[in-house]
C-alpha cells in the first residue's frame, strides 16, 4: 500500500508541474520532450513518466508518435473543458482572461439550468438550494474562505443537477473550478456582496415557486455580477454580453 501511495504522489506531483509548465507556455508548443529528461528532472522512474505522459496525451497537451517522440501541443488541441486543464490555466499568467472566458461559458449554461430547474427540481433539491444560500449568508463575512466556497459550490452543483439534464449536470466540475479559482487566486473579496447573495436567494425561491423566467434572469445576473467583480479585480474588460445593464 505504501509503494502504491508513493507512486501516486510522485505521479500527481510530476503531472501537476509538467501540466502547468505546458499550459503556462513555460514549455512552448512544438517542443519535443525526452522521457529520460523528465525522469531526471523530477527524479522519478520511467514508469511514472510513462503514466504522466499518457494522462497529458489524453488531455491533448502532448502527442506521442513513433520515430518522433513526445511533442507539446498547442492550446487548440487541449481538452479545454477538463477541470484539470482549467485549474492549470487559472494558475497561469492569463488567469484573468481565462476566468472571463469561463464566465461567458457559464452565462450560456447556468441561466438555462435555472430555467429548467424551475420545472424539474425535486423538493430535496429546492431544500438544498435554500440551505446553500443560508450557508453563504452565514459565512458572508469570510467570503474568501473555504466554508463560503463550499456553500457556493453546493448551490451551483445542485442547480445544475436540478436542471434534469445530464449534460448540464456534467458541467458542474467546470463551474466549481471557476468558483474555486476565484478563491484560490485571491479574486474574492473578504466580505461577500449582499446583492450577489440576494440573487442566489431569488434563484432558489423562483425555482421552488416554478417561476422559470425569474430564475433564469436572476442566474444570469449572478454570472454577470461575478464577471464584473473579477474584471474590476484584474483590470481585464469583460465581453459586452457580460457587462451589467446600467439602471
Image (cartoon, grey):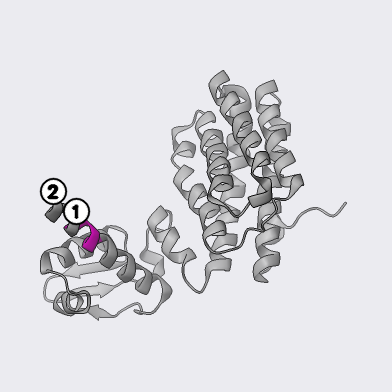
Q: Which residues are magenta?
A: 7-11
Q: Residue furthest right?
A: 247
**Left of 52 or right of it: where is 151?**
right
Above or below, 124 relative to 44: above
Residue 57: % across, % down? 25, 62
Neighbor class of circle 1 (other Cα within 10 Å; few <14, some 14-19, many 20+) is few
Question: Front-most of 5 and 86?
Answer: 5
Q: Hey, which quadrant is residue 234 in on the image?
A: bottom right
Q: Nearer the viewer, residue 215 or 145?
A: 145
Q: Does the magenta portion include 237?
A: no
In the picture, residue 18 is in which quadrant?
bottom left
* Residue furthest top as drawn: 123
Callout 2 touching callout 1 (CB < 8 Å): yes
* Residue ID for mark 2: 1
Q: From the image, give the main secondary structure of the stretch colored magenta.
A: helix
Tell me, for residue 239, which label it has, or none: none
Displayed quadrant of residue 206? top right
Q: x%, y% of residue 91? A: 46, 67
Percent of width and height locating residue 111: 63, 40
**77 on left or right of 36:** right
Q: Secondary structure at mark 2?
A: loop
Residue shown at 72%/32% (left/top)? 213
Nearest the viewer among 134 and 40 is: 134
Give neighbour class at mark 2: few <14, some 14-19, many 20+ (Cα, 10 Å): few
Residue 240: x %, y % from top left: 71, 60
Q: Is residue 95 left or right of residue 12?
A: right
Give me the C-alpha separation between circle 2 and circle 1: 6 Å
Q: Which residue is mark 1?
A: 5
Residue 9 part of the magenta segment: yes
Amino acid at each position: 500500500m505504501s509503494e502504491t501511495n508513493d507512486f501516486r504522489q510522485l505521479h500527481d506531483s510530476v503531472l501537476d508541474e509538467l501540466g502547468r509548465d505546458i499550459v503556462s507556455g513555460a514549455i512552448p508548443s512544438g517542443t519535443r520532450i525526452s522521457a529520460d529528461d523528465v525522469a531526471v528532472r523530477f527524479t522519478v522512474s520511467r514508469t511514472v513518466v510513462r503514466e504522466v505522459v499518457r494522462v497529458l496525451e489524453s488531455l491533448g497537451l502532448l502527442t506521442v508518435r513513433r520515430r518522433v517522440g513526445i511533442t507539446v501541443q498547442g492550446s487548440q488541441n487541449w481538452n479545454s473543458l477538463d477541470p484539470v486543464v482549467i485549474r492549470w490555466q487559472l494558475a497561469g499568467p492569463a488567469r484573468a482572461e481565462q476566468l472571463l472566458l469561463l464566465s461567458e461559458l457559464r452565462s450560456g449554461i447556468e441561466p438555462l439550468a435555472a430555467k429548467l430547474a424551475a420545472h424539474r427540481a425535486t423538493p430535496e433539491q429546492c431544500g438544498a438550494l435554500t440551505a446553500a444560500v443560508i450557508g453563504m449568508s452565514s459565512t458572508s463575512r469570510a467570503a474568501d474562505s473555504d466554508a463560503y466556497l463550499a456553500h457556493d459550490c453546493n448551490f451551483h452543483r445542485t442547480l445544475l443537477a436540478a436542471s434534469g439534464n445530464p449534460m448540464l449536470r456534467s458541467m458542474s466540475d467546470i463551474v466549481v473550478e471557476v468558483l474555486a479559482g476565484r478563491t484560490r487566486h485571491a479574486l474574492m473579496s473578504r466580505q461577500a456582496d449582499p446583492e450577489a447573495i440576494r440573487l442566489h436567494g431569488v434563484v432558489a425561491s423562483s425555482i421552488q415557486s416554478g417561476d422559470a423566467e425569474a430564475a433564469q434572469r436572476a442566474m444570469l445576473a449572478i454570472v454577470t455580477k461575478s464577471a464584473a467583480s473579477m474584471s474590476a479585480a484584474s483590470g481585464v474588460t469583460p465581453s459586452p454580453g457580460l457587462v451589467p445593464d446600467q439602471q
